[in-house]
Image: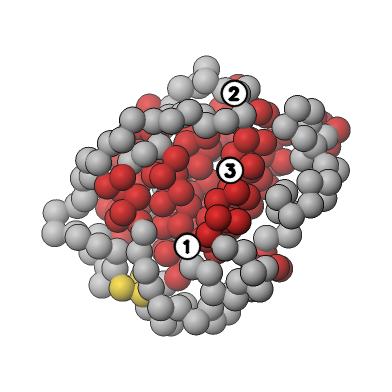
Amino acid sequence: MSKDRICPAASAYVDQALAAWDKKRSKLATKYLGRGIRKELNNQFTIPTMFPQVAVLATVTEQPDVTISLFHAFLEEIKHLREITFMGYETAGPFRWCAEQLNLTGYQNFFDETIEYNGFGRLPASENITRHITGDPYMNMDWLGTVEEPAPTWVRSPVPRLDHLLRDMCITATYRQYPYFNDLGWSLDDYDAELREDARFARARLGFTPDMPTFPENPEIHLPEGMTRMPRLSWNT
């Protein structure tokens, strides 16, 4: 097995996630995944980027089974680790947001992990969250447009624009959960408002009504045997 390939148990959950994906639900979302998505998700080095981005995409397109399978794949990959770098915790932030939107309260509580992290090697929020919508409603019109009307750049290149938006949402969800270097001065409500508006933009472009529906509460959670919480944070990060 290739050194950069995820473990077989995690790979099985990736297969499960892709099998659950409804290709007809959103033409743009399916186009975004592309033919190489299985290979991307099976690469351990893309876990911090592709796992949360696809989970967010599945969430805003109302596909909880896909999102949950990606949760399981991630947990299978890290279950034997005594500690993980902050890159692993960067995955937990977007996962927690996804669980909240889908009302998966068991997973929401699991990924709501509090850690002490000094932000070493990380950019302040103002340098990473550069295209926020709520602070200035016009700052994104050139690349995103409005909920009602996409920008010309989005119309010409929707897949790269969707990739940027999903990446921005994951970054915002990470800073929301770990507000170190929060030089934007945002409160939790500010982060929630930004993510809510991001989701409305995404859903409008993906063919849905802008506002997320309310899902019934689902407290079930299935963790790998012996796992009760995330591995501790490695400071060599």
Q: Badge 3, how many Cα within 10 Å: few under 14, some, many 20+?
A: some
Identify the residue at horizontal 53%, vertical 78% (top origin): 119
Left or right: 30 in relation to 133: left
Q: Which residue is mark 2?
A: 208
Answer yes or no: do the residues labelled 2 and 1 have beta carbons within 8 Å? Answer: no
Of residues 19 and 123, the one nearer the viewer is 123
N-terminal of the pair, mark 2 or mark 1, is 1
Specify the amino acid type for callout 1.
Gln
* 233 w.r.t. 167: above or below: below
Percent x, y of residue 188: 53, 59
N-terminal of the pair, mark 2 or mark 3, is 3
N-terminal of the pair, mark 3 or mark 1, is 1
Percent x, y of residue 40: 50, 46
Q: Is residue 154 visible?
A: no
Identify the residue at horizontal 47%, vertical 36% (top origin): 59
Q: Which residue is mark 3?
A: 196
User: SS for tag 2?
Assistant: loop
Specify the amino acid type for callout 3.
Arg
Q: What is the CA distance from the residue labelled 2 to the residue labelled 3?
A: 14 Å
Left or right: 154 in relation to 111: right
* 117 w.r.t. 130: above or below: below
Identify the residue at horizontal 26%, vertical 72% (top origin): 82
User: SS for tag 3?
Assistant: helix
Percent x, y of residue 123: 64, 73
Specify the amino acid type for callout 2.
Phe
Q: Which residue is mark 1?
A: 177
Left or right: 126 in relation to 212: right
Q: Quadrant of residue 143?
A: top right
Identify the residue at horizontal 67%, vertical 36% (top origin): 201
Of residues 165 and 16, the one nearer the viewer is 165
User: SS for tag 1?
Assistant: helix
Left or right: 122 in relation to 97: right
